[in-house]
Amino acid sequence: MSPSGNSPGPETGTGTPPGNVNGQAIAITVFSTVKRWGVPWLRSVAFLEPKLLPQTLLWLQRLSFIHFARWSLVTELPYNGAPQPRQKLRHPHMYFESNFNGGWEEYIDAFSYVLRPGMALFWGSSYGFPGAVPTAPFKKYIQTSDHRLVASHFYAAYPAATVTMVNQSIELDGHLDGLRARAKDLTPDEFAVAFDELLAKAQRCF
Amino acid sequence: MLLKLPIPGPADLPIPGPVEFGRQLIDTATAIIDTNRNGQAYAFLALCPIYPGKEAELRKTLAKIDKRKESPFARVTRTHFARWVILENFDNGTDFQPADEDDLECQFLIFSACFDGDRDSYLDEMIDELAPEIKEVWSHCIGIEVDAPADVKRYLLHNQIDSGFFYAAYPHTTVPEVRRMLKAQDDLRALAVRKHQLAPEELQRQFLDHFGSK
Amino acid sequence: MTKTDDRRAQAPSSVLDLTDIQGDILRAYGNDYDCTTYVWVTLSGGPKAGREFIASLAEQVTNAAPWKSGKPSHHLNVALTVHGLKALGVRDDVIASFSSEFRQGMKDRHLRLGDIGRNHPDHWEPWFQDGRAHVLVTVNALTQDDLKAALAPLRTSIKSTFGHAIADEEPANLLTGQREHFGFADGFAQPAIEGVTDDKARGGGVPQMFGRWRALAPGEFILGYPDEDTRDDPEKALPSAPDDPLGKSGTYMVWRKLKQDVGRFRQTVAAAAERYEGGDEAKLRAKIVGRWDNGAPLVEYPDAPPAGEFDGKAEGANDFRFMDDDESGGKCPIGAHVRRSNPRDALGWDGALSFRHRIIRRGMPYGPPLPADATKDDGKDRGLVFIAFNASISRQFEAIQVQWLNDGNVFGLGHDSDYLMGGEDDTERSMVIQGEQPFYLSPQPPFVSTKGGEYLFVPGIAALRALGAGDVS
């Protein structure tokens, strides 16, 4: 059942490059240049706050379309000796990657109308960040940034699944555990009743 | 207009039980001690300098690997997601960058992976399982001895970029668990749909067949 | 992008110029004008004769201004495919200013639309396969005689006067009681548009807090006006539209011919109802659609429909929400057709994830009805001519089709497609009907298949004249 790493994936319609797509999964890789005040801001506020107060990420959990995402500050380039040129960075740069499930329209809606304040937390100190209102320049910012880097190879371990499906299956597993343990000790008629109870409890899990 | 803080109101906040609360405390502590971690998940990122003049060749190599039937990362079964991306320059688009934007003097290979468990054992496993591809890919990079597993590991660690913040939708669920649960979801749905055709004995038997053990 | 820059100079008005907008976009003729023929024209007479034909049509089309002296006996409206624009000799740079999905056309978008398997363009009517469908002339008439009287001179003008050809004539008729072929009253939930249908905001607009609703910006449906993104833009940029003069008062149109297998639908529901709530077939039909046969919504009438006809046009008849009243789907299933195609607040966040995906819908059944007592198909071709108007085919029509009807993920339904309309595969469609004890509909071959269609541009009236005069050729 091992899902192949290179299934054709959904047509994203607004030009997501095929390299960034694997089944339902889409890879986004973005570097944005950060203003100097962004370094202390990101380190002491933006990156710390959601760790201390995980509840503030509930909206991201609820939107349920990002599997994994990460933000990193790059202030210097790792040096590996000659012939690598020694280069000192004039600006800090923020690396962002996301592994999410399309469609693209859903993603644009979520970022434009739901996640805007959250985006300001992470991208407010980046050059070109247009602020929350109006919407049109904001969308242009997302679209321009998100299509910039194309993955040469993108692997997803379960490309047919969406975040919602994974979350539902985790919840379902809990319901299944209850019946699994006692299923063989029940008479067939008792089992049929217990199975209906399971379906009723788990009806939003698939 | 539609702008409002997407912070859930008090009624939306699930009140965690003691177990859940304890787990959250541990998660918070882990994420602060090691910013690359979230629950049991780890996010690894390395920026590796590419030999000047070898960029096109590396692109070809990666394209060749990408066309293969199965991704090499499928062999490292702890991998949720992984990617190779070539960074040519810091190009945000002219509207979105400062006038004196950094101009990269050499291109970089971005390697990133989200996986289960700790970094060191993952890298060991990956270096072992991906030995041929590591040679193919990283031989285009400066400062690595692709034939020496110990040096590959040293190299990846040396070029690692720490996460500032790592979000995971299901930080406590491993790849094999995700796959098993997704299959159970499919199987249960199928059983639910054909339930009306099955006598209780048969229903019970099929349930035990599919779900009797994990 | 440069275009938006040019447009910043003039402050856009959000008051629609009804005399410049074709009449069938904002007004549903179908209710009164239940005799319709869609005439697909091939401009085989060459670009010059093509432009002359368009110029003659420009003087005949009905605009959206209120009628001054009673109901006209018929209406005529015009739209063009990208093949049509090319056949008129419209300049490449002008064509390039149209949206990419319009330029590609429905056929080339078939993968995205899920038109695969039995719905693949290879099985479409030939004129939708080979680019012969250039111009669509829609004739709506009060009676069959009015329709005949309007079609005769149109045919003469197309063939004799201008030397073009008719690729197809597709007659369509409202069925008794405003029903479509499966037997459901149709066409209730239309978007409320500012300055046009503000009175329909309750149930037709965007759900707001405290039970309020608001109408949508006109630019969601008519090009050249502010839409939901640009209405708050201090720079007054307008949404993307074709180059002027084509970018004003026009819109994009989706035309799809959907064949319905009424016999299969009736058999399937009857068989499933045998094990559903003591054989309650009417309720099972309602659960699949989300409305009873007479159109009454399940959220409001979960147990039984109101007696007699349901007046969908009455104030507040469509004023219902899913999350307030029915988050669990116990009344209207999560996968019911109306909940998928117009989710209102069902995706949470007060409709923030759905309000940019609304369409004006103008469907019209074609073919004879299957007799009410028939349980088997009689082999006759029948179905629905599905029509949608929107300012962005990809953001509006396609998003609904792709994310809401062909896939169930955003609703928590995995990759289930819409039970009523979706699917190309014989085995993969099923549906959960939530309730105290959930009910599972078995996998079924689809009831509906695509017989073809086109993406069209509906020019404003001044734009139509400009096309006729060769101003953009």
Image (cartoon, coloured by chain):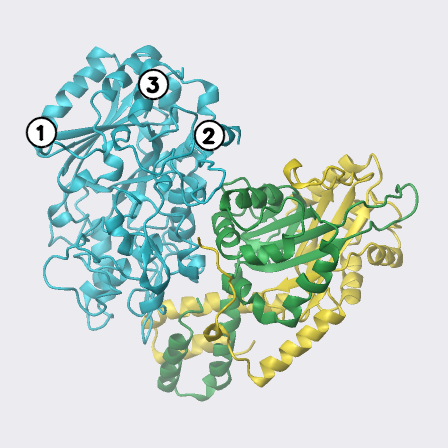
Chain colours: A green, B yellow, C cyan
View extreme (left): residue: C145
Residue A108 visible in the displayed image: yes
Disc 2 is attached to a residue of which chain? C
Marks 3 and 1 close (CB-CB < 8 Å): no
Task: Compare residues C50 and C105 and report the one nearer the observer.
Answer: C50
Residue beneath the point at 71% across and 70% down? B31
Of the image marks 1 and 2, the number of the one nearer the N terminus: 2
Of the image marks 3 and 1, the number of the one nearer the N terminus: 1
Task: Compare residues C299 and B173 and report the one nearer the observer.
Answer: C299
Q: Mark 3 points at which residue?
A: C466
Residue C412 falls in image quadrant: bottom left
Above or below for A204 versus C252: below
Q: Name the residue under label 1.
A: C146
Q: Is mark 1 on a helix, strand or loop?
A: helix
Marks 3 and 1 belong to one chain = yes
Q: Spatial distance from mark 3 to mark 1, Cα to Cα?
A: 30 Å
Looking at numbered disc 3 in the image, what kind of residue is underneath it? Ala
Residue A158 visible in the displayed image: no
